[in-house]
Image (tube, coloured by chain):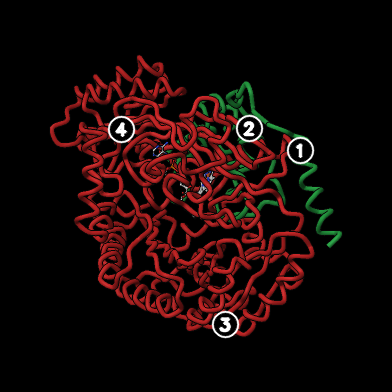
Chain colours: A green, B red
């Protein structure tokens, strides 16, 4: 019972620290770096068996951009409102120049 | 060019080629009576509201709005344009223009309604209202465990925000969290897998742009100075939030939600049952544990074939063209540490509460004929890992692998009939589903989401969309499932844009008329999402 009380109060203590967390002024997120977009979108599928490995293959940027906007077959399409043209240009170039990651697998 | 194979080039050529070919399609996408000039005039007006770069009606710009996984062999459903506002005022201006031009608009938040239509509208001739750019997290209250978000906020964004600010609250995700949104998912009454998994139950307060352009806040939100908008769901008088889910009565621009405090202890479990016939025993064992809330999260009871489809390809289990027989599935499942049914749940609380509940749960579930397994036995088994991640609101897209189970053509339609949480009902549904799927040569890749007192029977109709014959067959099969389940008193909790009318029919004429009357009263020009849930 003592541990129960102390675990609960630990949670409560952490929460109180924040008090009312109003994200003011709430800003729109800034453009994201290619690594971040890869990690938070592409990399959930590519390199983990959902999609083919796409790093370290010198994929031409035009190919990457066409796949991202169209979403062929099982791949979802991504709109400009999700990945801006500016972000996609940088991502496609980064991907072309990227090294293969030996931990990734794909089919 | 060394690393590029023939398939990639073919795919890219297809992708680029489609852009050119699409020009011819524009006319065939129009609604009856709508002309190219009508669309041009409306879209020019949209440019003046949101800026030139955020209105699309050229074939290339529309491509990502046109992606679909659902069967739609008649090829009628395509948007004619898309517009992406950034503020509520812009949304109001768009709604005013839509009324003036009599141009229907189809709101999406993140537009990743995959297997239900993605961003594609339910009738031809609509302009997609893409709210993804409205992506601010407006407030998180760590004491109350509440938040207020705009439509374009993804689960990934919310989770990052909580982590970056050390706020010990969890999110609850559908299986496709990274690219989907709390707003879109909740408004379509989607589900996730922590104790906050029935998303609409944990929604609290909305801001809505009504079809006449007025801005309404529900619950306590319209009380000046109220601090309880995200804490008290009901407000005063009729409770209206439900009217804005699975409907076309308004455009939701802010959504309040409850977030679960991170529990000190979290312990995921898997129960492995050996036979297809174990369905009723599992449901009967789970029900009392769920109804009493001893098990508090929404459980996934996954068939072996559904599980295999996530990480394997069909031709690694049976040869191409052969039926997916139980013996082969069982063999493949066993080789991967899986049973014919694999039910995942977790205990949340403190070490003491978990230790107190675990023996009760173990006893009930072992008596049902299942092996009760934890991380100690399952280790880094990818399926166990996947579900253990989901049940604490973690992010991945692993399940999308299932769309490549059967050919690479990318076809998926969810058929999701509801039942009461009774073993015999689940068994009868399983039998009927398998009978119909067998008849059309498709696989029973299905799961039961075990809710508090209900079952969502989640049947993934997986097909090769690039094969025209198979595409047509999937469509016929889906429709037969809807009607034959309907005859037994079972209807879907949600459906794709291709079958919204058909599912609405199952719910009967009085309900349809009631929905139609509300629509007529609120949106006499029928400009918001005609066809959504079968409401014109
Ligand atoms: C492999 C796989 C697994 C999946 N697992 C799950 C799961 O576990 N649980 C689940 O629920 N779903 C699941 N889905 C289905 C779907 O992908 C998710 O539900 C997803 O969250 C919906 O997309 P979204 O969040 O982008 O919503 P959106 O597509 O943005 O919205 C969905 C619909 O809600 C309405 N809508 C959206 N925003 C507004 C608004 N602001 N105002 C008015 N109406 C609006 C529109 O009708 C829209 O079409 C899965 C799909 C796949 C492919």
Residues indicated by labels 3 and 1 sit on the same polypeptide chain: no
Mark 3 chain: B
Tag on residue B105?
A: 4
The verdict on a common chain for dots 1 and 4 is: no
**In the image, which disc is placed on residue B274?**
3
Sequence-earlier tag: 3 or 4:
4
User: Is residue B94 shown above or below B166?
Assistant: above
Q: Position of residue B220 (x, y in %)?
A: 49, 35
The residue lying at 57 percent from left, 53 percent from top is B196
| C-alpha span from label 2 to label 1 | 36 Å
- Image quadrant where one finds the N terminus of chain B: top right
Q: Judging from the image, what secondary structure is the residue with disc 3 in?
A: loop
Q: Are marks 1 and 4 in contact (CB under 8 Å)?
A: no
Compared across the picture, whether B281 is left or right of B78 comes to: right
Q: Disc 1 versus disc 4: distance between alpha carbons?
A: 44 Å
Image: A31 above or below B118: above
Label 1 environment density (alpha carbons within 10 Å; few <14, some 14–19, many ≥20): few
């Amino acid at each position: 019972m003592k541990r129960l009380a102390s675990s609960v109060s630990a949670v409560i203590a952490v929460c109180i620290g924040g008090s009312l967390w109003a994200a003011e002024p709430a800003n729109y997120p800034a453009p994201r770096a290619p690594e971040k977009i890869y990690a938070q979108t592409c990399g959930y599928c590519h390199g983990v068996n959902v999609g083919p490995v796409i790093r370290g293959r010198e994929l031409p940027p035009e190919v990457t951009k066409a796949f991202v906007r169209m979403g062929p077959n099982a791949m979802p399409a991504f709109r400009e409102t999700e990945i801006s043209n500016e972000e996609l240009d940088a991502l496609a170039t980064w991907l072309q120049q990227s090294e293969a990651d030996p931990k990734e697998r794909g089919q | 060019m060394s690393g590029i194979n023939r398939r990639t080039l073919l795919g890219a050529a297809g992708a680029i080629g489609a852009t050119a070919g699409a020009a011819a399609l524009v006319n065939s996408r129009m609604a009856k009576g709508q002309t190219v000039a009508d669309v041009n005039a409306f879209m020019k007006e949209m440019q003046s509201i949101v800026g030139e770069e955020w209105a699309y009606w050229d074939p290339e710009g529309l491509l990502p709005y046109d992606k679909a996984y659902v069967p739609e062999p008649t090829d009628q459903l395509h948007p004619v344009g898309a517009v992406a506002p950034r503020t509520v005022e812009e949304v109001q201006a768009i709604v005013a223009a839509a009324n003036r031009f009599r141009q229907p608009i189809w709101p999406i938040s993140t537009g990743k309604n995959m297997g239900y239509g993605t961003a594609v509208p339910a009738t031809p001739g609509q302009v997609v209202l893409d709210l993804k750019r409205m992506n601010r997290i407006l407030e998180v209250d760590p004491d109350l465990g509440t938040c207020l978000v705009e439509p374009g906020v993804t689960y990934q964004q919310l989770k990052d925000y909580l982590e970056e600010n050390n706020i010990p609250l969890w999110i609850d995700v559908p299986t496709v969290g990274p690219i989907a949104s709390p707003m879109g998912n909740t408004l379509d009454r989607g589900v996730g897998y922590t104790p906050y998994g029935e998303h609409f139950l944990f929604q609290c307060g909305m801001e809505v742009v009504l079809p006449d352009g007025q801005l309404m806040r529900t619950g306590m939100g319209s009380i000046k100075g109220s601090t309880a908008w995200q804490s008290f769901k009901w407000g005063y008088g009729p409770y209206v939030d439900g009217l804005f889910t699975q409907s076309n009565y308004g455009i939701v621009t802010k959504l309040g939600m409850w977030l679960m405090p991170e529990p000190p202890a979290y312990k995921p479990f898997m129960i492995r049952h050996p036979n297809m016939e174990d369905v009723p025993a599992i449901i009967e064992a789970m029900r009392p544990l769920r109804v009493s809330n001893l098990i508090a999260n929404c459980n996934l009871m996954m068939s072996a074939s559904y599980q295999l489809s996530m990480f394997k390809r069909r031709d690694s289990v049976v040869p191409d063209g052969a039926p997916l027989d139980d013996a082969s599935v069982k063999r493949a499942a066993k080789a991967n540490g899986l049973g014919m049914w694999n039910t995942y749940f977790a205990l949340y609380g403190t070490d003491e509460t978990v230790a107190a509940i675990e023996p009760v749960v173990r006893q009930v579930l072992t008596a049902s004929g299942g092996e009760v397994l934890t991380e100690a036995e399952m280790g880094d088994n990818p399926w166990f890992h996947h579900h253990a991640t989901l049940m604490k609101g973690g992010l991945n897209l692993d399940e999308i692998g299932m769309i490549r189970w059967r050919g690479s053509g990318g076809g998926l339609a969810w058929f999701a009939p509801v039942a009461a949480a009774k073993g015999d009902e689940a068994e009868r549904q399983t039998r009927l589903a398998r009978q119909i799927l067998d008849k059309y040569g498709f696989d029973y890749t299905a799961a039961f989401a075990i809710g508090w007192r209900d079952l969502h029977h989640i049947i993934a109709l997986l097909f090769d969309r690039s094969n025209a014959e198979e595409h047509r067959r999937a469509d016929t099969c889906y429709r037969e499932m809807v009607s034959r389940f309907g005859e037994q008193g079972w209807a879907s909790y949600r459906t794709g844009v291709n079958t919204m009318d058909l599912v609405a029919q199952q719910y009967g004429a009085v309900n349809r008329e009631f929905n139609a009357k509300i629509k007529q009263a609120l949106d006499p020009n029928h400009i918001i999402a005609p066809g959504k849930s079968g409401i014109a």
